[in-house]
């Protein structure tokens, strides 16, 4: 996936789209991506807080097959 800097670059680039489409209130990276044990084969843990209830579209956000592949979304 890259470095924490790479991850944050992607999240900043996608932020407006993700917040608008899914009604996000906040988003944070946690886990190994923020520690010294992050490796090239590590996943990226991202926690999101929703402004509104979300239905089946949560699958689109967290299925790992879209443009956010490699991220594990926790809700």
Image (spheres, rainbow, N blue to C red):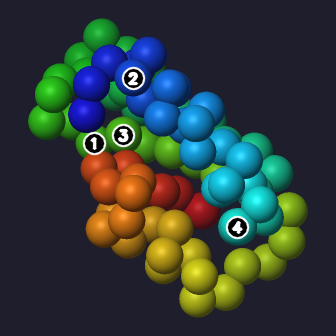
* Closer mark to the observer between disc 3 and disc 4: 4
Q: Earlier in the sequence, mark 1 or mark 4?
A: 4
Mark 4 lies on residue? 22
Q: Is residue 42 left or right of residue 45?
A: left
Q: Is residue 43 left or right of residue 4?
A: left
Q: Earlier in the sequence, mark 2 or mark 4?
A: 2
Given contact means CB atoms under 8 Å apart, are the residues at marks 1 and 3 in contact?
yes
Q: Residue 21: x percent and y percent?
A: 70, 67
Q: Which secondary structure, mark 4?
A: helix
Q: Which numbered marker is on residue 43?
A: 1
Q: Residue at 70% across / 67% down in the picture?
A: 22
Q: Residue furthest bottom?
A: 56
Q: Which numbered marker is on residue 6?
A: 2
Q: Earlier in the sequence, mark 2 or mark 3?
A: 2
Give the CA separation, mark 1 to mark 2: 13 Å
Quadrant of the image containing the N terminus: top left
């Amino acid at each position: 996936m890259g470095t924490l800097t790479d991850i944050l670059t992607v999240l900043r680039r996608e932020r407006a789209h993700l917040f608008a489409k899914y009604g996000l209130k906040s988003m944070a990276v946690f886990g190994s991506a923020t520690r010294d044990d992050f490796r090239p084969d590590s996943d990226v843990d991202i926690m999101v807080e929703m402004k509104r209830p979300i239905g089946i579209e949560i699958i689109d956000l967290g299925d790992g097959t879209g443009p956010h592949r490699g991220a594990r979304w926790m809700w």
